[in-house]
Each structure stands twice: as C-alpha cells, then as structure tokens.
Image: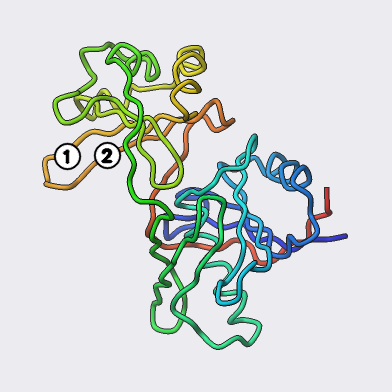
Amino acid sequence: MQRRYVTTDVFTDRVFGGNPLAVVLDAEGLTTSQMQAIATEFNYSETTFVLPPRQVGHTAHVRIFTPRVEVPFAGHPNIGTAVVLAQELEAGGREPVNQFVFEEMAGLVPIVLIRDTEQVVGAELTPPETLSIRSSVSLDDAAACLSLPSSEIVDSNHPPQVASVGLPFLVVEVASRDALRRAKPNLAAQERILPPIGTDAVFAYVRGEATGRLSARCFAPLDACLEDPATGERHRCNNWPTHVPSVEA
C-alpha cells in the first residue's frame, strides 16, 4: 500500500535550507516499527506521521520519529506538519482555519497558523508542558560533551542542566561565538553523561550583544542526528516537492 508524504524545509524561505522534515499524511494502519523504519529511511532529524485525532475537536494525532527513536514532542516537526496539513486540507476544499490542536505523546500542542495574504506560510506553537528544570551536570562534564575546555562553559546564569517543555535537552551556555563554532559532540562523553540524566541531546548557546538574542547549536548523535540544523517554535515553511508516493514498510 502506498502512503503520501511531503518533504518540507522549516525555518527558511528557500529550498534546501533550514531543517528538513518528512510528513507522512495518511499514516493510519502503520505499526510503530513501520513508522520507525520509514523515519530511518528518510534519515531526517525528524519524520512525522499524521493520524486521525482520538478526541473530537482536535485536528490530528501526530507521532514524531527521529532516525532511531520516537520522541514525545519537538518544535520544527510541529511547525512543518501544521503548514503542510493546512495547505493539504485547504487544497482539498476545506474552509481555512487559523488554529490546530495536535495530540502528541507529551500532550496537546495548540498551534496558530500564520498567513501571508491567504496562504499559510508558518505557524506558532504552545509547548505541551510548562518549563521544567531537571538534573544538572558539572562544568567538566558539559565541556566534555561539547569537546571544549571547561573554561569555556559559563555557569554564572545557570549551571549546565536539563530543561524541558516536552522534550528534554542538556542546556549549556558557552563563553563566546567562537566556542560555539568550535563545539562538536563527543560521542563517548555523551553516552556516559546524558542517559543517566534523562536526555540524549545537548543544546549549546551563547548570549548575543543584543538583549534576548542567542546563537545556538543542538547536538544529538545518540539519536542518530549529529547536529540538528535548526530548532524552535515559529517560522516559515518551504514545501518541496508536492506529494510523492511511498511504499509501506
């Protein structure tokens, strides 16, 4: 049986920029192992599977897979899936709407669609959980995860610690943009340090000169994603191509 899917680029206004995503539009009937096999075949940072909602009033039940595991929630897959699904529904004659609610493993994800004139071009989401602050690690361990010296890890604002709004990351502030540029994942260190604190990814960032401006990189080699190209909760989507059939795994 063939399944329709769309590949899209999130957080960009050009093809092959931003963060790629595959959206399988008619996933009903696929098993978990089949979904995982399809996501592994795409080998994008995430692939989503759109299923009928479990409750009346919700838009869809959405499952998110990396090439290795299913995750409870993530930012760019929700943005991309919302834009793709809105364009798909409206192309099929559905009345335009401005909001979606996705059911996900972490909870309900409300989404507001962003339009340029009449066309849906982006979305903004509300995470399914309030911010939770979890385990912290030493400067040495954080530095080891990023292949940096401990002197380039900043703890004056917060220690290196796990934070989550639905998907946990070890959040680490580094001292400079140069340190952020030189950071690279140390697989052995991450295998030792991350699983015991409940995550498999490191979100490293540096504060910019402008208030509230950050530069960031996200590494998840334990999840088969050496570096996530971009992550977040609001931006535009550029779809390419249109629907392509995929044989069920």
Q: Which residue is the site of mark 2? A: 215
Q: Residue at x 37, y 20 (%)?
A: 146
Residue 140, numbered circle:
none
Percent coordinates x, y for residue 211 in the rendering: 12, 47
| Image-based side of 149 in relation to 240, left or right | left
Give me the C-alpha separation between circle 2 and circle 1: 7 Å
Tell me the SS state at disc 2.
strand
Name the residue type under label 2.
Ser
Assess whether mark 1 and mark 2 are in contact (beta carbons under 8 angstroms). yes
Residue at position x 33%, y 46% in the image: 131
Helix, strand or loop at label 1? It is: loop
The image quadrant of residue 158 is top left
Residue receiving disc 1: 208
**Sequence-wise first label, 2 or 1:** 1
- Residue drawn at 46 percent across, 30 percent down: 201
User: Please, is residue 246 above or below residue 183 in the view?
Assistant: below
What is the crowding at mark 2: few (fewer than 14 residues within 10 Å), some, or many (at least 20)? few
